[in-house]
Amino acid sequence: MKDALSGLVLLALMGGGCGKGDAPGPMHGGDAGTMMGGGGQHMDMGAMGTMMMQHLGPADSGYDARFIAMMIPHHEGAVMMAKDALVHATRPELKELAKSVITSQEQEIATMKQWQSAWAGGTDNGMMGKPMMDKMSGMGRDMTAMLGPADADYEGRFIDAMIPHHQSALAMANDALGKATRPELKELARSIIASQQIEIERMSNWRKLWAKR
């Protein structure tokens, strides 16, 4: 059980399967449902979403805890990327979006950690030791490292990384609407869907607009 939980948390932290070698390339005009890797390969969001649903598992007594165990590091990855954008992005609208991501997702992280502690008697449910937590932190740093330097393509890389990351959060939240048992978790899922769908639409529009310039 410990190995299974550790695996799903690491998957969530990387946005559903984006490895260190899958750095997003420059901005392109493709579908937001795919993400361009550094080698030119596309990662299908449908396949990524299916893999994440398998890790969330059935609507059993442990579902709510598994959802939180995945969503907390997933949010933390988004916050790391957004903080990187505050430093390296140049467009004010992208900086504002980054600030919004940081504010909303840090609040949601705090809420989920409170629930995790209350529901399971500890922030990690005793399932993950220090080596695993250290590895998760290192992978979070990898996510910001793959965004690259503050060059002309930075904002395109940020968008091409954040859209799939948000889409994987939507897939998880929609799954929770049908499987979670606690009403407060269902309400959080609705909030994630509402806010991140709007952000996906904004970033998709920016990508199309900026790619023409």
Image (tube, rainbow, N blue to C red):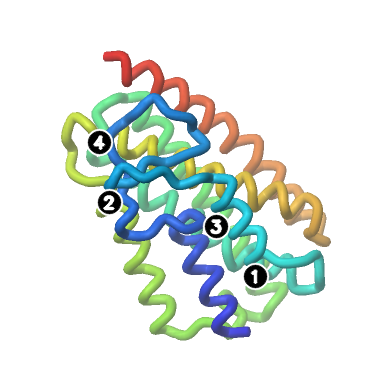
Residues at discs 4 and 3 in contact (Cβ within 8 Å): no
Disc 4 or 3, which lies upstream in sequence? 3
Quadrant assignment, res 198: top right
Closest to the camera, between mark 3 and mark 2, is: 2
Residue 188: x percent and y percent?
69, 49
Quarter of the rendering occupied by the C terminus: top left
Asked if the residue at tag 2 contacts the one at tag 3, i.e. Cβ–Cβ closer than 8 Å, the answer is: no
What residue type is disc 1 on?
Gln
Question: What residue is disc 2 on?
Answer: 146
Q: Which residue is mark 3?
A: 109
Q: Which residue does the image show at 47% across and 85% down from the upper left?
A: 129
User: Within 10 angstroms of label 3, few (less than 14), some, or many (20 or more) residues?
Assistant: some
Labels 1 and 2: the sequence-earlier one? 1
Looking at the image, is mark 2 or mark 4 earlier in the sequence? 2
Using a 10 Å C-alpha cutoff, classify the residue at mark 1 as few (fewer than 14 neighbours), some (14 to 19) or many (20 or more).
many
Q: CA distance from mark 3 to mark 2?
A: 23 Å
